[in-house]
């Protein structure tokens, strides 16, 4: 374990492409297809998305993104920690960084969709710890028993 650095990522490297492909594959294995909202590489390359990777040396250990919904509201997307590094503080550091950056970019609200299955419990607890509260579906999402919606004023 080296020093972790978090930086905006242009999504051009093969390591981040593999990391995100594993993320989408994992989400598909856990969530019914109609309830899967993880963005693939092309979805994350859209101009309204800002994406960060967390790296230790050359290894990608985490990632996260925000997608602009409007001038003041963004959605947190693609939060992932390397499976071998879960519960090691990476997600907290990454989320803190993204919250700071979202505020710096002028957003006043950050919302997210995550799963309701037990697998997603640590993620929901993390978001609660950072002040996210449960809310109604937003930005075109529909009520779904497999989805939990959360939001936070910045």
Image (cartoon, rainbow, N blue to C red):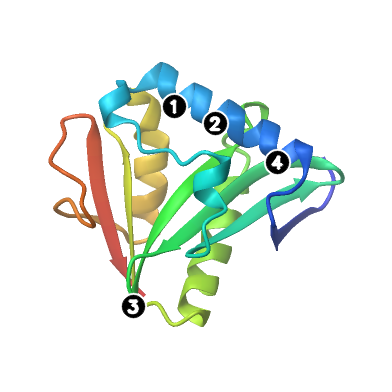
Looking at the rendered structure, the secondary structure element under dot 3 is loop
Nearest to the observer: residue 145 or residue 142: 142
Q: Earlier in the sequence, mark 4 or mark 3?
A: 4
For mark 2, give the secondary structure. helix
What residue did someone put label 1 on? 27
| Residue 55 falls left or right of residue 106 | right
What's the distance in space between the residues labelled 2 and 4, CA to CA? 10 Å
N-terminal of the two: label 2 or label 4?
4
Find out whether the residues at labels 1 and 2 contact each other: C-beta distance under 8 Å.
Answer: yes
Q: Which residue is mark 2?
A: 23
Residue at horizontal 43%, vertical 17%?
A: 29
For mark 4, give the secondary structure.
helix
Name the residue that disc number 3 marks: 72
Which mark is first along the chain, 4 or 1?
4
Where 27 sits versus 15, above or below? above
Q: CA distance from mark 4 to mark 3?
A: 28 Å
Q: Quadrant of the C terminus?
A: bottom left
* Numbered tag placed on residue 96 in the rendering: none
* Residue 9 to residue 41: above or below: below
Disc 1 to disc 2, how far (Cα)? Answer: 6 Å
Q: Give the labeled residue for mark 4.
A: 16
């Amino acid at each position: 374990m080296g020093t972790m650095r978090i930086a905006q990522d242009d999504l051009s490297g093969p390591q981040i492409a593999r990391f995100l492909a594993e993320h989408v594959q994992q989400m598909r294995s856990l969530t019914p297809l109609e309830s899967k909202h993880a963005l693939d590489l092309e979805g994350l390359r859209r101009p309204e998305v800002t994406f960060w990777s967390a790296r230790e040396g050359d290894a990608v250990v985490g990632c996260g993104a925000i997608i602009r919904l409007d001038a003041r509201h963004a959605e947190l997307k693609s939060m992932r920690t390397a499976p071998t590094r879960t519960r090691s503080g990476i997600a907290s550091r990454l989320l803190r960084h993204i919250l700071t950056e979202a505020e710096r970019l002028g957003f006043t609200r950050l919302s997210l969709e995550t799963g309701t299955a037990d697998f997603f419990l640590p993620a929901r607890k993390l978001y609660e710890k950072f002040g996210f509260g449960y809310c109604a579906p937003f930005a075109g999402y529909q009520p779904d028993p497999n989805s939990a919606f959360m939001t936070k004023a910045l």
